[in-house]
Image: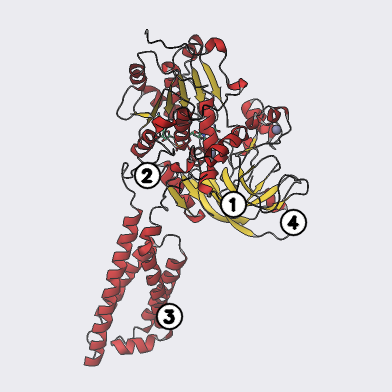
Amino acid sequence: MGRTFRSAAGSLKPMKALVWHGTTDIRCDTVFDPTIEDGRDAIIKVTSCAICGSDLHLYDHFMPGMKAGDIMGHETMGEVVEVGKDNTALKVGDRIVVPFTITCGQCPQCRRGNFSVCERTNRNKPLGDAAFGHTTAGLFGYTHLTGGYAGGQAEYLRVPFADSTHIKVPDGIPDEHLLFLSDIFPTGWQGAVQCDIQPEDTVAIWGCGAVGQMAIRSAILLGAKRVIAIDRVPERLEMARAGGAEVLDYDAEPNIVARLNDMTDGRGPEKCIDAVGLEAHALGAVDAVYDRAKQAMMLETDRAHVLRQMIMVCRPAGILSVPGVYGGLIDKFPIGALMNKGLTVRTGQTHVKRWTGDLLRRIEEGQIDPSFVITHTIGLEDGPEMYRTFRDKQDGCIKVVIRP
Amino acid sequence: MSTMRHPYPTRPAPGRGAQAGHQELARGLGWFSIGLGLLELAAPRGLCRTLGLEGRETLVRSYGVREVATGVAILMSHDPTPWILGRVAGDALDLATLAQGFDGDREQRANLVAATAAVAGVTVLDVVCAQGLMADKRLSPPGRYDYRDRSGFPRPPRAMRGAAADFETPPDFRVPDALRPWRDDGAA
Ligand SMILES: NC(=O)c1ccc[n+]([C@@H]2O[C@H](COP(=O)([O-])OP(=O)(O)OC[C@H]3O[C@@H](n4cnc5c(N)ncnc54)[C@H](O)[C@@H]3O)[C@@H](O)[C@H]2O)c1
Ligand SMILES: [Zn+2]
Ligand SMILES: [Zn+2]
């Protein structure tokens, strides 16, 4: 909740952080430095952090569970400056990337590598149980449903369960190449891995934000025959093409489902990835207007336009992979098509640490450089403005890195 | 690691960095405001005598307060644009006040002409600065930036297809064999 550290006595120093105050109201405030609260903690001095599409769901306030005063941010890296007494895995001076999913490393889910559903790190377990039936992992800067932990868009970050929640990275590689191990690179990767890609596969990817871009590269690396990417922002489509995708502009193509069927001999893509999430946009489509209205009346929380397209167009026995975030309820869900076509649906917040060892090696070997996606580098004080620019996709903005 | 590229070039927030010239100008104008304001506060009588504006000392002192406040606001604020616009309005007031002094003696008139010219010059700078700040914040239309070189791959994407073939899909992420894709033999 970004405020717990204030209860700690002793000499509290001020630091700058991006703080959520309400719908589209994020400010660069002066708050207290975090302090060690538990023996497994560590404090890092943040050297780089990023703004994510997930943060936009909080900025626009479509995800429930934020409170005024919460510090934003879950894509963070930095240098360890303080370590709790029980944390033998880290020492002062270590350079780490912080996975956005907080993991205990010991519970049955963590032991299976299902880190994003760790059973112990959500300190607001009852809220998580109420919202999702069962608690999921604690997340940085991402609502009180997942623990209400202070985020990393700040000068310092307390990392709870830090002996397990970290990725050590070597010196000598710039932050830009490594930062996205915290979230979007493994998220795009898991989005593609969930498709269990075969050499014959056509993979259709909705959304060419940072997550979509990483999913495109991952699908290519994993050997997809064709990758078709869908968005409407010219710069994003161009970047998708640069990564090896054929692109569809949904502004220019009124019927994406028909077009995808045309491109695949009428059978549809074998694999579909939703890298858009609950703010899916649609031009004049009947269901889109319906969703927007119901969302406004609080009768549903999420817009499902992309999910519906995926279910309808996917080849029977195909796979839907959903890294795009949803928070609550949708309706007009074509369960008939989903069931009768025997589709497999794979979803989830990313099990970051499950993939990062392998992905770090691929970065070191030069197989991919995730920094291609960064369009803006700013200081914390420009954060509030850049949230708006990023949300509105202005100034060619695709990914913002903050250097506190 | 030898293959690692330098990170791709990035931009600062709109209105920052390379276009920071207008921000610098704004800071200069902020300091100028404070200097002039302090002078107006410290020596209103001398100023009025020099310019043939006797009897307007209180007014000049209030202008001094305005100048200092605006200057401090420019230097302290994250976005000085509204304060620079405020300066433009202040310049108009100054010019109107100076225009009232033209019935003084010959020496005062010469001083007044010089002062009016100076204020007019600063007004031009204020207008240029305000326009520049506003233009810097105007965002480019979509499609302006060229991302064609941003593949993230060391070789063309075609050559990267399947480069991660060494990756083994974990068993819990594998599709059950019965649902594995059919070999597409082209007999559609
Ligand atoms: N599963 C995870 O762990 C995880 C991690 C990070 C992000 N995410 C989620 O992934 C999603 C994408 O993140 P991002 O950072 O790329 O966000 P982003 O907002 O930058 O990108 C979303 C893109 O979707 C496009 N879009 C909107 N409506 C569309 C439609 N109908 N069809 C096709 N494209 C459409 C937008 O134009 C935009 O380019 C978000 O929902 C985010 O919360 C999930
Ligand atoms: Zn994220
Ligand atoms: Zn766990």
The amino acid type, in three-letter code, at marker 2 is Gln
Give the spatial CA distance, label 2 vs label 1. 27 Å
Q: Are marks 2 and 1 in contact (CB under 8 Å)?
A: no
Q: Are marks 4 and 3 in contact (CB under 8 Å)?
A: no
2 vs 1, front mark: 1
Q: Chain of mark 4?
A: A
List x then y, in percent, for residue A194: 54, 24
Q: Disc 1 on helix, strand or loop?
A: strand
- Write down the quadrant of residue A116 in the picture: top right
Determine if the C-beta at disc 1 is less than 8 A from ligand 2: no
Share a chain, discs 4 and 3?
Answer: no
Q: Is residue A219 left or right of residue A167?
A: left
Residue named by callout 2? A394
Which residue extends farthest top?
Answer: B187
Q: How many marks?
A: 4
Q: Is residue A345 above or below residue A97?
A: above
Share a chain, discs 4 and 2?
Answer: yes
- Write down the quadrant of residue A115 in the picture: top right
Q: Chain of mark 2?
A: A
Determine if the C-beta at disc 2 is less than 8 A from ligand 1: no
Q: Which badge, 4 or 2, is on the more N-terminal residue?
A: 4
Residue named by callout 3? B38
Q: Nearer the viewer, residue B132 or B169?
A: B169
Residue named by callout 1? A46
4 vs 3, front mark: 4
Q: Quadrant of the C terminus of chain A?
A: bottom right
List x then y, in percent, for residue A189: 52, 31
List x then y, in percent, for residue B109: 23, 87
